[in-house]
Image (cartoon, rainbow, N blue to C red):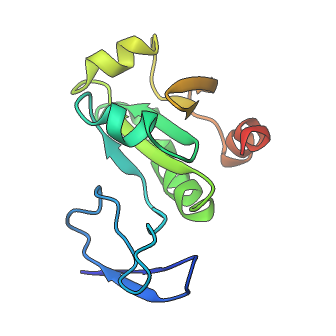
């Protein structure tokens, strides 16, 4: 089912397919990149392209499918992605499938939230935190 994303530049409503949403969609009218309002899936292979080259800060959720606290905060991560679209990109990294990137940032427990800019860590939260605490921690960097 397609998703409607409004362009922050010209206001046009763009129908974007759910499949392939990990690719940066652009506005059909003015060709401006559309802001992601959902978490982006990041892997060891696309980390450099999606995170290090991002013009916006990236909140990286390092998680695993078997982790109960990770599943508990997943809806909060979705809300943050939607609410801060255009100011922040939210990405998810499965630590089981992408150990190289998790190791690079010395992730020792999950869930771990890393706020990154230009591939550098600005701050981190280890554990399942309420939405208010997450927003309070990342707000100074936005």
Q: Can you say whether 67 is above or below 78 in the image?
A: above
Closer to us: 24 or 101: 24
Residue at image position (40%, 13%) is 104
Q: Is residue 49 left or right of residue 13?
A: left
Q: Can you say whether 51 is above or below 17 in the image?
A: above
User: Which percent across, then down, holds residue 114?
Assistant: 55, 29
Q: Residue furthest front?
A: 30
**Image quadrant of residue 120?**
top right
Residue at image position (47%, 44%) is 54
Residue at image position (74%, 47%) is 132
User: Which percent across, then down, holds residue 61?
Assistant: 46, 36
Number of numbered markers: 0
| Residue 126 appearing in the image | no
User: Which percent across, then down, holds residue 93?
Assistant: 35, 34
Image quadrant occupied by the N terminus: bottom left
Closer to us: 19 or 76: 19
User: Which percent across, then down, holds residue 71?
Assistant: 41, 42
| Residue 142 appearing in the image | yes
Residue at image position (31%, 25%) is 95
**Image quadrant of residue 50?**
top left
**Image quadrant of residue 26?**
bottom left
């Amino acid at each position: 089912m397609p998703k409607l994303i409004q362009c922050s530049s010209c206001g046009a409503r763009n129908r974007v397919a759910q499949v392939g949403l990990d690719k940066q969609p652009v506005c059909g009218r003015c060709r401006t990149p559309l802001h992601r309002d959902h978490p982006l899936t990041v892997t060891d292979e696309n980390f450099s392209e999606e995170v290090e080259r991002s013009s916006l800060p990236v909140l990286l959720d390092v998680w695993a499918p078997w982790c109960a606290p990770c599943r508990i905060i997943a809806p909060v991560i979705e809300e943050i992605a939607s609410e801060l679209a255009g100011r922040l990109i939210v990405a998810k990294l499965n630590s089981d499938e992408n150990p190289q990137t998790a190791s690079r940032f010395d992730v020792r427990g999950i869930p771990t939230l890393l706020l990154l800019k230009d591939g550098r860590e600005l701050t981190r939260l280890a554990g399942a935190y309420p939405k208010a605490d997450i927003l309070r921690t990342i707000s100074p960097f936005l």
